[in-house]
Image (spheres, rainbow, N blue to C red):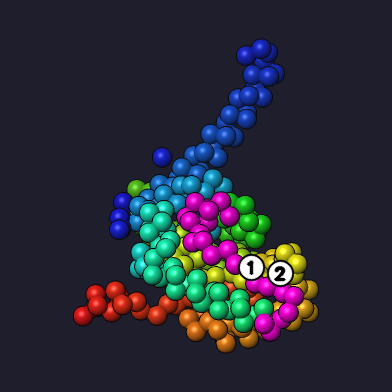
Amino acid sequence: MRRFGQTPGAIVGAFHALIFGVTVALAEDTADLDAIAAQLLPEQVASAVAAIPEEPRKLLAMRSYLRFSGKLEERWSWSEEEIAAFQGSEAQLALQSEIDAISADFAERNPGHAIYVHSRVRSLDTQIDHWNENNSVGVSGAEIHEAWLNSKAATPSPTDPKALARFEKWLKRYTPETRAHIAAPGLSRHGRAQAIDFQITKDGKIIASTDYDAIETEWRQGGWEDKLKASVTAAGPCFSGPLSSLHEPWHYDYTPQPTAADTSGSQ
């Protein structure tokens, strides 16, 4: 493994045996993918794969991890200890100051409306929960899973280097028609305080949310995409966006200015 940084009657008995057999088969399939992940991915990343119970979602996450090969360590979400250390730090205060400036500018430009931001760093556990529940991940995962089972790369042995290489090559090249709306667990920029989602409220009620189905009705027709962009541009020099690779009018990446500690450490 690579590292960086587990009977009352015959009819009833037969039924139980059938269910048990299906359960064992599914468990073996999942165990195979976990074993494959342990061979192809760093230990911490393979552990995230093991925390995804459904094989299609597991396979889709592995695709992202393999495609990020070489950049996983620098992109991987902070640990709970790192998140705790960030709270109250100079870097966290700088981020909050910029969010406050954007909020103030937005409120001045749009009387009666406000910005809502959940700025806590998104932990790996939270990202895994979102991945396991997200509908778009389920659709995309089912697509890639079916294609995998019908491919020559299916069911590679974790102990066969050639089969593993064939599997890795196929998975990195395959592109599902349906794209998942969230990053694979551990790869979200929210996991390192490098992205913020802004939502719009009126009278304490969210009127422009992070719902993909409401982009047209809430963000475009309401004009909030442009209005938020104006305030971020005016008052958020370290923010860029909104996200365009997968259109999210609420999502802005955050690239902080080097702190005094960063500057002195580089000399």
Quadrant (top left/top right/bottom left/bottom right) for the C terminus? bottom left
**Could you classify mark 2 by the number of other residues whose Cα lies within 10 Å: few (under 14), some (14-19), or many (20 or more)?**
some
**224 lies above or below 187:** below
* Tag 1: amino acid: Tyr
Please state which amino acid type lies under the numbered disc 2. Answer: Thr
For the magenta stretch, what is the residue range?
A: 108-130
Q: Find disc 2 in the rendering and name its residue.
A: 201
Give left or right: position of 233 versus 110. left
- Camera-nearest residue between 187 and 208: 208
**Residue 148 position (above or below residue 240):** above
The residue located at (63%, 86%) in the rendering is 230
Where's residue 123, x and y in %? 48, 56
The percent position of residue 239, horizontal first and vertical second, equals 51, 80
**Residue appearing at x 72%, y 74% in the figure:** 113
Q: Is-magenta flag for residue 122?
A: yes
Query: How many labels sit on residues?
Result: 2
Tell me, yes or no, whether the two marked residues, 2 and 1, touch with CB atoms within 8 Å: yes
SS category of the residue bearing label 1: strand
Quarter of the view holding residue 257: bottom left
| Residue 148 covered by magenta stretch | no
**Horizontal and vertical percent position of residue 100:** 55, 74
Of residue 38 and residue 167, the one placed in the foreground of this image is 38
214 shown above or below 150: below
**Residue picked out by circle 1:** 116
Q: Residue 173's x, y, as percent?
A: 49, 68
